[in-house]
Amino acid sequence: MAALPPYSSNAQIAWYYGFRTICALIFFFLVFPIMVIIPLSFNAENFFTFTPEMLRLSPDGYSLKHYQDFFTSEAWQNAMWNSLTIAPLATILATVLGTLAAIGLSQSHVPFKSVIMAILISPMIVPLIISATGMYFFYSRVGNFLVNDVGLPLDAVNFAKIVLAHAALGTPFVIITVTATMVGFDRSLTRAAASMGANPVTTFFKVQMPLILPGVISGALFAFITSFDEVVVVLFLGTASQKTLPWQMFIGLREQISPTILAVATIMVALSILLLTTLELLRRRSERLRGLTPS
Amino acid sequence: MSSSETMSVEEQLAAGQTEDGIVRAADGTPLKARLAKALRREKLRSFLMISPLLLFIVLSFLMPIGDMLLRSVENKIVQNTLPTVVQELERWDPASEELPDEATFAALATDLKIAVKERIHTRLGSRLNYEQSGFSGLFRSTGRAVRKMEEGPYKEQFIKADEDWGKLQTWVVLDSFKAPYTAGYFLNAVDAENTVDGVQMKAENERIYIQLFIRTMWMSLAITFMCLLLGYPVAYLLAHLPARTSNMLMILVLLPFWTSLLVRTSAWKVLLQGQGVINDLLVWVGFVDDADRLVLINNQTGTIIAMTHILLPFMILPLYSVMKTISPTYVRAAKSMGANDWTSFWKVYFPQSVPGIGAGAILVFILAIGYYITPALVGGTSGIFISNRIAFHISTSLNWGLAAALGAILLVLVLLLFYVYDKIVGIDNVKLG
C-alpha cells in the first residue's frame, strides 16, 4: 500500500481514502474503550459518563477522589498486595522451570518431542474454566490432606495453591518465547566456550544466558501478566484472604459498580503500557544481538 | 547442525581405518560406540532439563483435569450408602414392571438405618435429586421414618412412609445408578435421561444444555466473524505500510492485547450502560430518543461487542504475520496482465492470505468458546456461555458431576479444534506479541 500513484482514477483515490478511514475507525474501536476510562476516572461525581462540568473542562468536574478511595480502602489495598505477592512468585517459578525445559527441548534428539511439547503447552489451550474446575476438585483434596493430616497452616496452603496454579498457567508463554529465541541461537558459541575449558554451568551463565535473556524476560512478563490478570482460577481456588486485584474488580463489577474501579483500571492501563514498552525495547535488543537490524 | 554429526567429522579425521575394518576413535574404542554414548548423554541431559517442568505440569495441571474427567462418570455414592440394596437389585429386572421383592426392601431398611446413623442418607438424596427431583425429600422423610420401623414385612411400611417407594420409576433410577460409574451426568449434559424405556431425550421444555452449547457455538462464530471483518483491513494496512508507520500503529493493536481483561470488560460495562457514554452520545446526536435508550448490555449484543473487542488482537496478529510473507510481485504481475484492483485482490492476494484467516479464526473461536468472565459480567441471562453454566453448577447448585461432564464435552470440542489448528499452523508457530 505505497503512496497513491499519480495516474490513479477517481474511484481509486476514493477507495484509498475510504479504506484508510475504515481502518482509522477500527483503530478507534480498539483503543477508545481503554482511553475513555482514563478521563472518566478523574470524575468528581460518582457517574460513569462525562458530566457537563467535565465537558467544559472546568476544574470542578475533575478530582482524585476515586484514587483516594483506592489507596485508602482496606479491601483494595489487600487485593493489591495479594496480587503483588502472588504474581512475582508464580512468575519466578514459571520462568525458571520454563526456561530450563525450553533449552532442553531445543536440543537435537529429544525423544517424544511433539508429545512433550503438547503437554507443556496444554495449560494455554485448555479453557480456563475447565482448568479451574479440575484444580478446584483436585487442589481442595490435596489441600485438605496437607492441612488436616500433615498439619500445615491453612493460609499458607491456600496461598501456595494459587501460586502453583498460576505458575502452571504461565509456563507455556515462557516455553514459547524462549524456544523462539533458541531458534536463532548459534550452538557453536557454547562449543567454543567448552573448548576453552569452561564447564557447562559457566558456559550457560556467561555465554548462553545473556543471548537468550530477552526471550526469557519477555516470557517472564507474559507469565507475570497471566497471573496478575487471572481471575477464574482465583475465584475457584481462593478464599477471602487471597482476594486479588482482578477478583476485587470482578466483585465490584458484578455487585455494586463503584467508580473506584475506573481508577484501578487506569492504574492497570499504565502498568500495561509499561510492560508493552519494556517488551518492545527487549525485542529491539534481541534483534541487535542477533545481528539483525531493528525494524 | 547437530552435535553428533559434527563429532563424526572430527572423529573421522582423528580415526584411521584399521585392519579389522572398524573405524576407531583416537583412544582405540570403536567410533560407533563413542557416538552412541554421546547421543545417549545428550538425550539424558535434555531429559533432565525438561523433566522438572514436565513433572510440575503433570502434577499441577494434568492430574486435576484427569480428576475432573473421572468425576464426570464416578458414582460410588449409591454403592457406599446402600451396599446391600445394590446387591439385592442385581436379581431385579426393571423390565418385569414389578416392584422389587421383600428382600430388597429389607436390605433398604438395614442400609438406611446405618446411613441415618452416619448422617449420609441426605447426601445420597441430593445426589439422586440431580437425576430426578423428589429424591431429596424422599430420603429425608424416609430417613425419619426408618428409625421407627418395626420388624418386616418392610415393603408396606416403606410405601406408607413415602408413596414414591411404590413407584416403579424410583426403583428404575436407583437401579440405573447402582454401578460405581455412570453415564448419567453425560446424559444430563446432552438433555437426555434414563427411563423405564431406556435412554430418552428430556421433555422439550426441560432441555437446556444442547441449546446452550448451540448458543455458545453460534455466538463464538459471530464473534469470530466480527473479528475477521474488522481484523482483515487492519492487518492488510499494517502489512503494507512502511515499517516505521506500521510499528507505530501496531502499538494500537498491542495495547488492548496487554491491557487487563477486567479493565476492558469494565470499560465496556461503563460505555454500554443505559446512562453510559455511547447512549449519551447517541441521544446527543439525536439518533436515539432520551426516553428509549438502547439496551446494549446484559444481553447477547453486549457479549458480542465486548468479546469482539477483547479478541480482535488475536485475529490481527496471525493475519498480519501471514500477510507480511505474501510477495507483492504476484499482485503486480496480475495487474500488469490487465486485472483490475478488485480481481487482483480477490483472485491473487486473498487466496494467499487464507492460512492467516484459518489461524486467526480458529484461535479466536477456541478462546471465545471457553470464555467465562466477560459473558458473566456483560451477558445478562441471554448472553451467557456454557462456561457460566459450569461455574454455576460448581459454586451454586453443587452438582459437580454435571459440571465435570459439561466441562469434558467442552474440553473435547476445544481439543478437536486445536488439533485442526495444529495441522494448519503448528503449535511451535504460535506467535506472541
Image (cartoon, rainbow, N blue to C red):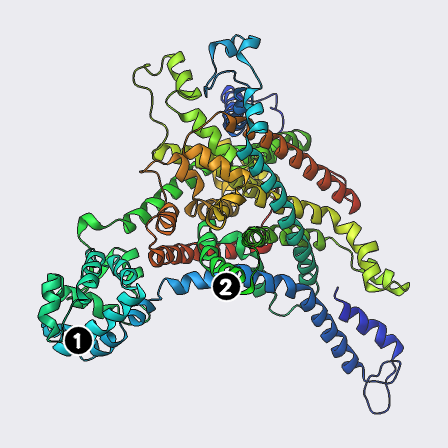
Q: Nearer the viewer, mark 1 or mark 2?
A: 1
Q: Nearer the viewer, residue A245 or A189?
A: A245
Residue found at x 65% / y 46%:
A88
Residue B282 occupies which quadrant of the picture?
top left
- Residues A130 and A76: in front is A76
Q: Give the residue type that dot 1 points to.
A: Ala
Residue B129's quadrant in the figure?
Answer: bottom left
Q: Secondary structure at mark 2?
A: helix
Kindly identify which residue carries mark 2.
B63
- How far is the residue under mark 1 from the one under mark 2? 41 Å
Task: Kindly give the residue lying farthest to the right in the view shown.
Answer: A196
Q: Report the residue at 25% width, 55% height from top.
A: B191
Q: Is residue B349 visible?
A: no
The reply, left or right, for residue A174 in relation to residue B225 is right
Q: Is residue B263 visible?
A: yes
Percent of width and height locating residue B196: 15, 66
Secondary-structure class at tag 1: helix
Number of the label disc, if any, that sits on residue B303: none
The answer to whether residue B23 is left or right of residue A19 is right
Position in image of residue B431 (x %, y %): 60, 47
In the image, is B205 to the left or to the right of B256?
left
Query: Percent from the top left, x then y, of residue A11?
Result: 49, 22
Front-lying residue, B155 or B177: B155
Label located before the other in sequence (1 or 2) = 2
Residue B275 figure quarter:
top left
Within-10-Å neighbours for mark 1: few <14, some 14–19, many 20+: many
Residue A170 % position (x, y)? 59, 50
Residue type at the position of mark 2: Met
Query: Circle 1 is placed at which residue position?
Result: B106
